[in-house]
Image (spheres, grey):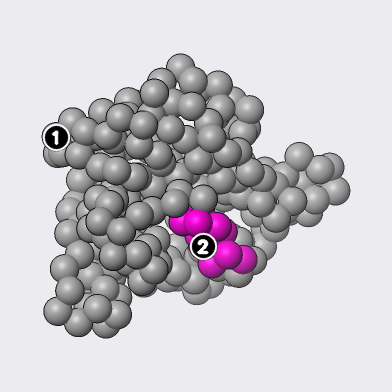
Amino acid sequence: MDKSPKRIGELFDDISPNYDLLNHLLSMSVDVGWRELALKELEIRKGDVILDVATGTGDMALKTRSSVDCTIVGIDLSRNMLKTAMQKWDARFPGGTFMALQGNALQMPFADDSFDRSMVAFGIRNMIDIGGFLDEAHRVLRPHGHMAILEFSVPPYPLVRQLYLLYLTRVLPFIGGLRSGNRGAYQYLSESIRRFPSPGSIEELLVQHHFRTVRSLPLTLGVCHLYIIEKM
């Protein structure tokens, strides 16, 4: 799979008008609850400085700022996704400031120990080097800072797994292709979920990159997984 920053940026530029719909399709419309749980578990406090990696259309940033008075910085490869995020932010918080920049999460332009909390929702599986991202996330988090990783996964239960894989490989590319005119993008997103490492493998990787897993939660029969981790 081509996960070069250029390729991923172009892919999400292309599907940005339909991205919010895509998340609902992938999650069968339960992603709203997943995001709320991730933010609850992250325990963001008033005045915290938060990094939203792969901010996309800004859903996590908007949910965070709606519930806590904090500072949020977003980073994403896709300029078009960021434009959508800014439009949504302006509609929700007229006159407010959302600091969002186009950039690569493997080479973030932030000083060491800059953020109290970090989060990445449905973005880590699109990174060409997950370990490299974890090193960068570790660098920019303050000591004992927490990060929430929310990502799609393949259910471990045989029947649920079979049905979900059928949905991923046949139904999603068909519907997404009809909606956007770009079936290939949806086929990539389906394949990226199927190839993403298992929760056990991710937890081992986290240890290797100096994080402690605080919570590891399968969601909706394993369709999604939430990791709350702490910088060690």
Which residue is painted at 70% across and 55% down in the image?
220
Q: Position of residue 106 (x, y in %)?
A: 27, 33
Q: Viewer-proximal residue, 18 or 111?
A: 111
Among all residues in the image, which is located at the extreme top? 208
In the rendered image of this protein, does residue 209 appear above or below residue 179? above
- The residue identified by callout 2 is 36
User: What whole-number distance in Å separates the C-alpha atoms at marks 1 and 2?
Assistant: 29 Å
Q: Nearer the viewer, residue 103 or 59?
A: 59
Callout 1 environment at 10 Å: few (<14), some (14 to 19), or many (20+)?
few
Amino acid type, label 2? Glu
Type of amino acid at the residue the image marks with label 1: Ala
Magenta segment includes 104: no
**Side of 50 relative to 110 (left or right):** right
Q: Main secondary structure of the magenta part?
A: helix
Label 1 sits on a secondary structure element that is loop
The label shown at residue 32 is none
Q: Position of residue 134 (x, y in %)?
A: 37, 30
38 drawn magenta = yes
Q: Is residue 35 above or below residue 207?
A: below
Dot 2: few (<14), some (14–19), or many (≥20) neighbours within 10 Å? some
Report the label total.
2
Q: Residue at x 14, y 79 (%)?
A: 95
Q: Quadrant of residue 24?
A: bottom right
Magenta extent: 30-40
The residue wearing badge 1 is 111
Mark 1 or 2 closer to N-term?
A: 2
Residue at x 38% of width, y 53% of height: 44
